[in-house]
Image (spheres, rainbow, N blue to C red):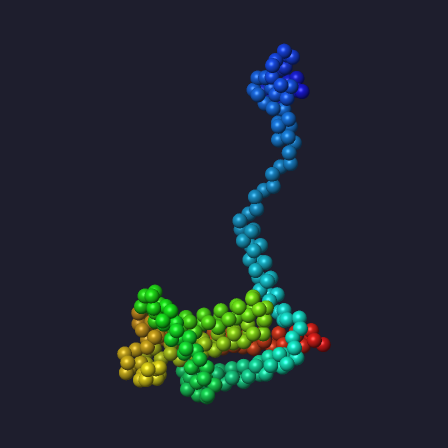
Amino acid sequence: MYKKCPECGYERKGDENAPDDQCPACGLIYSKWMKNRFAPPPEPEPDTFEIAESRLKEIGRTILERVIAPKPYLDPMVVYGQLILLILLIFVGVRFLSYGVDQHLFQGMDARFLHRVNLVFHEAGHVIFRPFGEFIFILGGTLMQLIVPMVFAIYFLFWREDSFSSSAMLWWFGQNALDIAPYVNDARKMELMLLGGGTGKEVGGHDWNNLLRMTNCLKYDNTLAWIFYSAGTTLMILAIIWGGYTLLLEHKNRA
């Protein structure tokens, strides 16, 4: 029992009716006052920026681990199959890069075959994005060509933890960028043959002619085409390096 209240300074006389643990004058409860007075200081609230930075670092580490970490063991036949696929991607990739920004769609069975595969997703994109207005409807074909391989790349990397398959999907993403480049490059000339037959001039335009006209960027068609072509080239090369590195790690794990 305190004879003098630490809060208000009242001196207890001994004939008060208040409990021993309470000041008769201000009502302070001594036990609670002691608990609060000598309690450890509260921990400072974490900084929002620090939390975001920590989470980004964690995400970055996870991505890096998935990118450079192959499966612990694969059947030799699977590894040989991956090696064959990698050689094929290198061979086809070199051929694509030799065609140039405006001609590769028409040179070689490999280019025509992959163009037809990409065309399926391109046309599906127009259907899927139709409800979002004319501009997005026209752009939807290009978007879907890029979305599909990227979704597969993310799926293989994070859900299947298969970095080699993800690298192959990245190669396909880059190849789609090469597939798009000739149509961007053709926005003013409109000489490429379209799916329904006839050139852009004959049918009144095509996707990228319309997109660049709607944005007043038609004069930048060649520049934008080279951006697509350069980005696609870079991604295909990175995908080959990534796939080869993954196979090398798998070989070391088996040794």
**Relative side of 204 to 66, left or right:** left
**Relative side of 155 to 12, left or right:** left
Residue 110, visible in the rendered structure: yes
Residue 229, visible in the rendered structure: no
42 lies above or below 8: below
**Relative side of 164 to 151, left or right:** right
Please give the name of the residue rendered at 45% of the width and 84% of the height, measured from the top-left corner: 113
Please give the name of the residue rendered at 60% of the width and 24% of the height, measured from the top-left corner: 29
**Relative side of 106 to 190, left or right:** right
214 lies above or below 199: above
Q: Quadrant of residue 162?
A: bottom right
Please give the name of the residue rendered at 56% of the width and 20% of the height, measured from the top-left corner: 26
In depth, the one of 9 and 227 nearer the eye is: 9
Across and down, in percent, residue 62 comes to 59, 62
Residue positioned most to the right:
255
Across and down, in percent, residue 220 comes to 36, 73
Q: Quadrant of residue 219?
A: bottom left
Q: Specify the quadrant that holds the N terminus.
A: top right
Please give the name of the residue rendered at 32% of the width and 75% of the height, measured from the top-left corner: 209
Q: Specify the quadrant that holds the C terminus.
A: bottom right
41 lies above or below 104: above
The image shows a total of numbered marks equal to 0
In depth, the one of 129 and 167 nearer the eye is: 129
Across and down, in percent, residue 34 comes to 64, 28
Q: Quadrant of residue 120?
A: bottom left
